[in-house]
Amino acid sequence: MTGFVQQVTPLILTFNEEDNIVRTLEPLGWAREIIVIDSGSTDATLSILDCDSRIRVVTRAFDSFARQCNFGLSQIRTPWVLSLDADYVISPDLAAEIASLDPHAPVAGYQARFVYRIFGRSLRATLYPPRTILYRVDRARYRDEGHGHRVEIDGSVKALAAPIFHDDRKPIDRWFLSQIGYARREADHLLGSDRTTLGRIDRFRLAGWPAPIIMLFYTLFVRGCILDGWRGIYYSFQRTIAELMLAVELLDRHLRGTR
């Protein structure tokens, strides 16, 4: 690949991603340099990364997603960055679309929609909104939002047609441990926000008990995950459990008087 991609550096955040990182790296053969911000992996992640001379690993203790990403941006030496989580996989169509972009177009960033995969098989729907993954480094700044993070782009953002795959294959016990932290940070966000600024979904979540029930019904039947068989049920259960853990966190704070 030539042209636009010569001005793009992939940026990946990692922490014990041996089950995912190889699939994330495979579609990035065009990259001259790949920046990885690692939070202190203790599995085989660093050994895998060390096999590719294009990869520059910078270790930084994790404090928040936004700070980690903003630090990563400071390491980029090209005008554009392709920001990826370690369980994202660039689809072949998306790789071709990125390669065809005009580097001089009056655009500050591009967003891509997700196709969620469970053990390599795509689901017909996901709750993930599109994410801005490709953008000019000097136009971007991250901020924390709940358990996640959001990049703010100074300028116009266009949608890419092709999807990016989300395919997380870490062990389920890692998923449960992650959700504990996510629930805590999401509760901080919901309780610390002006309720008049919260959307309808977040107001349901703040109420506690309705959200898990609504989530199970919505993912299985409204979004059609029931038609994806056991993989769709698996995904629906994950989303429902995540909402249930948040509801328990909120209820725990209410009963302890620490809201």
Image (cartoon, helix red, strand yellow):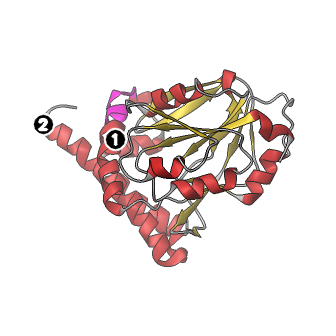
Residue 82 on image: x %, y %: 66, 39
CA gap between label 1 and label 2 equals 16 Å
Rendered position, 205 above or below 70: below
Is 192 colored magenta in this rendering? Answer: yes
Residue under the image location 37 percent in, 45 percent down:
205
Rendered position, 89 above or below 58: below
Q: Is residue 147 left or right of residue 160?
A: left
Question: Sequence-wise, which precedes: disc 1 or disc 2?
Answer: 1
Q: Is residue 102 left or right of residue 77?
A: right
Element under label 2? helix
Residue under the image location 54 percent in, 75 percent down:
228
**Nearer to us in this view, 222 or 168:** 168
Chief secondary structure of the magenta span? helix
Q: Which residue is mark 1?
A: 206
Residue 253 on image: x %, y %: 19, 38
Residue under the image location 46 percent in, 62 percent down:
169
**Nearer to us in this view, 169 or 130:** 169
Looking at the rendered structure, the kind of residue marked 2 is: Arg
Seen as rendered, the residue at the extreme left is 256
Rendered position, 54 above or below 119: above
**Nearer to us in this view, 248 or 70:** 70
Q: Which residue is mark 2?
A: 256
Is 120 colored magenta in this rendering? Answer: no
Element under label 1? helix
- Chain part drawn in magenta: 187-194
